[in-house]
Each structure stands twice: as C-alpha cells, then as structure tokens.
Image (cartoon, helix red, strand yellow):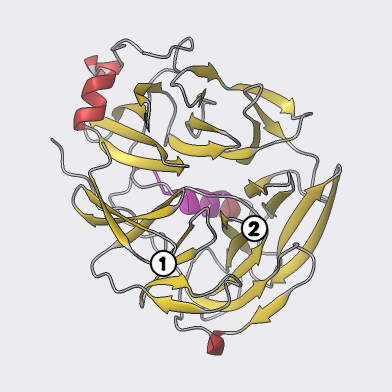
Amino acid sequence: MNDLPEFPDLARRTADTVTPPAFDELVDRARRRTTRRVAMASAVAAVVVVAGVGLTLELGHGSQTAPPTGQPTATPSPTVAPDGASVAKILADGHLVSVAGRHGDILTVRTLCAQGHHHCASAWQLRTSSGTSSGLVGGRSPRAYVSGDQFVASGWNLPGVVVHADGTTAPLRRVGRLTSAPDGFVHTGSGAAAVDSADATMGSLPPIGDVADIAEGVVTPDGTVVALPLTAGPAPVKVATYADGRWSTRTLDEGNVPAALVTGNDRVAALAGIDGKLTDVGTLAVSVDGRNWAMLHPADLPFSSVTSMAATDTGTLYLGTRQGLFRSADATWTRFTRVPIESARLVASMGDQVVVRTGADSYTGLDADGHATDLGDLR
C-alpha cells in the first residue's frame, strides 16, 4: 500500500505539491486578479463566528483525470478507471484526500496516482450503519462534502455526484443560476458553487454587490447562506448572508484574501488572511445571527496563528495553530483550551467529531469534549 503523503500545511506552499489544497487554490485565483500589492511586513488573519452547519478540508494532492461517475447504482460494479485501476484498487491502495461525515455516516475520497502524479483516478466510499457503497469520482482534486441530508463527491473541474444514504447516486448537473434554495457548496475552478442536493444541481447565486464569485459558502439549518465573496485583489474581507433573496454584508477585516468557513450547530467560523497567508490572528468576531458582532483581539486568545479549522455538528470549534491544537471552551466560541494530543494534524469535520491525522495512515476522532476515538485508516 502506498504511504499517505504528508498533508499540506495550509499556512505555506510545498515544492512537491502538484495540486494545491483548497486555500492555496483560492489564493492563486486571488493573486491572478490582484491589482496592487499590500505594503505590510506581517500578515493578519481574522476569525469570525456566525450561524451554520459544516466544512471539510482537503487532505491530499495529485492531478485527477478520472471520468465522471456513471448512472446511479446502490451497489456499483468494479468499473475500470484510467490505467486499469478499479474502484476496489483505488480504495485499497489510494491516498485519502478528503472526508466528510454526518450522524455517524462517513464519505471518504481516495486517489491513486501513477507516473509522478500525472495519471490519477479517484473513488468515493460511503460507510453507514446499513452497509458500505462506493464508486468512481472524476475531476481534479475530488473532495467529499455534506450537502443538506446528502453527501456530494465532486472534482475541482467536474460536477461529480450526489451520494444518498442508501448508496445510490445521482449525477450532479451544472446550471447557470441556481433558482432553488441551496443546501451546500462545492469547490470549483471559479470559487464555490451552490448545490441543491434534492434535485442534484449546482450553480451560482446572485452577485454579492458587484462581486459575482463566492470564495467559500455554507448553509445554516434555517436555510440562510453564509459566504465569503471572492474579491478581485487586495480588498477588505467581508462576510455576506443571503436570506429571502437578498444579500447583506459586513466588513470583517482590512485583509485581502477570504480563506475558509467552518460550521458547527448554530455557528460559523470564517477565516480571512492578508497577502495569501494564514498567520497572525488579527480579530475574532463573534455573532449568532450574522449581523451583530462582538470583537476579540490577539491579547484575548491563547494562540497567535491559525493553520486549519474544523467544527463538530454539536457546536465545538477546533483550530490547528502553530502553538498546537485548540478547541472552543464554551458555546460562544470566544474562549479556547489546548487539546492535549501530540503530533496530530487537524484535517476535517466529521459530524459529531473532528478528524486529526496521527500517523502515516491513521486517524483519531475528537468529540465536543476533546475525548479521542481511534478511527484507524478510515477504510
């Protein structure tokens, strides 16, 4: 079995990363649109909390060229992928690149590459209390997502599939403007696309002011969309909420790159950075409705940087930092305590737990109180 490659540090680039993690993809797009440079000696990150549901983080890298998944099926046959790799072989020998979970169900995506990461194929696997199902997923950098009551397996440049709890799938269709209410988001080459998993469509939402693209988005339990507009170059970072067909925005930080959203229960944490780096924390703004805010400052926090974020669906925020792993100490997400676990990297949200990588192919789940559960290799 191939050893799982080192997960990319979201705070920096690595020379051997062929396909960048989600944050770096966002930074690349922002930099290509940049019209001026930021004259600052250090970068600033802002963490903001509002209302909502969940985010998964990309775990691995490699260029994917597998074709789209075929017709819906509850028990997929071992369809042959490029270079002769079947779904079974990809799942057995491939690298874990993404994981998402809800209510005990887990969707993972693994990628198997050959010839220096130039020829890759990917497959998804859904594990539930009633059984396991799997299938191919095409496109570059495929990831697992939670969307409403369903899962989605989707590539960066191909729509992918909606995966139902019984293992059946429906091809995710791309439309121009999504006319129905979204229940999730997936990453694409032009930002985050809204998804309606009920009718298996993905598309854009109305522009946020003069900004058409969304960097990151989530949907709260009451159907409110929370998004970070994808700004064209250096600009104040804003968070936007969409309800009843209208956007409202709030300026969060004088940074220039909207970075990430994670959600848990009735909150969302939004991270913004300057000049494409997740480094020193500048502001922690807390809200339960996306409109009224309380601000925290670096002196109020037990860490000085944030490299990754994830949250449980019961409402505990976990932060990977240069000073170690921290979790929220109360329901306000304004107080944090260190998690006493060494040599662990925070990688994903997974329902009532977050996932940390503890070895080459071993993972641990941490619940709302920081209690650990061995997850093995997540197969």
Q: Residue at x 24, y 17 (%)?
A: 83
Q: Is residue 128 left or right of residue 72?
A: left
Q: Nearer the viewer, residue 188 or 136?
A: 136
CB atoms of marks 2 and 1 within 8 Å: no
In the depicted structure, whether residue 361 falls above or below residue 310 = above
- Asked whether the viewer can see residue 37, the reply is no
Q: Residue at x 83, y 56 (%)?
A: 248
Q: The residue under label 1 is which amino acid type? A: Asp
Q: The residue under label 2 is which amino acid type? A: Asp
Q: Residues within 10 Å of mark 2 (few under 14, many from 20)?
A: many
- Of the residues under marks 2 and 1, which one precedes in the sequence? 2
Closer to the eye: label 2 or 1: 1
Query: Which secondary structure type mostly characterizes the magenta part of the structure?
Result: helix
> Disc 2 marks which residue?
266
As drawn, which residue projects farthest toward the front? 130
In the depicted structure, whether residue 112 falls above or below residue 291 = above
Q: Residue at x 28, y 20 (%)?
A: 87
Q: Residue at x 34, y 41 (%)?
A: 97
Badge 1 marks a residue whose secondary structure is loop
Q: x and y percent of residue 223 in the render? A: 73, 44
Q: Residues within 10 Å of mark 1 (few under 14, many from 20)?
A: few
Badge 2 marks a residue whose secondary structure is loop
In the depicted structure, whether residue 180 falls above or below residue 235 = above
Which segment is the magenta one?
Answer: 18-29
